[in-house]
Amino acid sequence: MRLSPEVIVDAAVRVAARAEPDGLTGKALGNELGVDRSAVWRHFADRDALLLAVGDRLLKMAVDGVPQGLAPRERLVHLAGSVVELYVAHPYVGAAVACRTLRGPGELAAIEMMLASLQELGLSKETTARFQRMFADTVLSYAGMRAGYAVLPQQIRDADEQLWAGAHATVSPERYPALAAHVPYLARQDDDSVFASLLDAFWLAVAHDASSQGPSQ
């Protein structure tokens, strides 16, 4: 097989989807590609460089998956959902790169889509840049948190999820009255509705600024 950075990243994405802690080792990638592990490192300076390339590929996949012809809001909502889905599906990579600058074409394409979509709403360049950062930080923070949770052992996740279900019996209403009153409602919250509410809050802020500005500058 003729190796190239693209071929190696393709293999790394497949391996990362198996959610194994040591998925991006030379050994794992060598086995996936049917080559000696040393061949991988002729194309990447180190594991961090490979990790960033795989994270960038996930962003490219998210951008490429956004259907053509969507309005700005629907476009970015679709992008946000795809980023979260891909980071959770490749959890060790997603958790590791959510706070990183990836420096690749996937990240640049995602930023371009965010800026262009927000600019279509008539925001000034300065406000567009601020909301792009706000949107990216919100989506990546949430995606990284979900990915980090996905790599926890199942017994830990089960214990965490059961905590709120039984919290009403352990929380002192005298010491934590607001918490005790809201425990049943906290237990009902799910990831999708929380993420949707985060995006709704973002769009309310965008709408407020768009209505108060004149033509984009």
Image: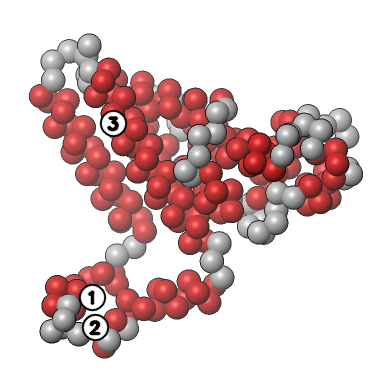
Image position, residue 106 (x, y; %)? 54, 29
Residue beneath the point at 29% across and 65% down: 189
Q: Neighbour class for label 3 at 10 Å: few (<14), some, many (≥20)? A: many
Badge 3 marks a residue whose secondary structure is helix
Badge 1 marks a residue whose secondary structure is helix
The correct choice, above or below, for 101 with respect to 116 in the image is below
Towards the viewer: 104 or 57: 104
* Mark with earlier residue (2, 1): 2
Q: CA distance from mark 2 to mark 3?
A: 39 Å
* Mark with earlier residue (1, 3): 3
Residue beneath the point at 13% across and 84% down: 174
Towards the viewer: 216 or 189: 216
Quadrant (top left, top right, bottom left, bottom right) of the C terminus: top left
The correct choice, above or below, for 137 with respect to 168 in the image is above
Q: How many marks?
A: 3
Q: Amino acid at mark 3?
A: Phe
Q: Which residue is mark 2?
A: 171
Q: Label 1 near label 2: C-beta < 8 Å? A: yes
Q: Quadrant of residue 51?
A: top right
Q: Amino acid at mark 2?
A: Val
* Mark with earlier residue (2, 3): 3
Disc marking residue 183: 1
Q: CA distance from mark 2 to mark 1?
A: 9 Å
Residue beneath the point at 50% across and 57% down: 148
Quadrant (top left, top right, bottom left, bottom right) of the N terminus: top right
Image position, residue 6 (x, y; %)? 72, 31
Tell me, yes or no, if residue 72 can be seen here. Answer: no
Q: Residue furthest bottom?
A: 169
Q: Which residue is mark 3?
A: 131
Q: Neighbour class for label 1 at 10 Å: few (<14), some, many (≥20)? A: some
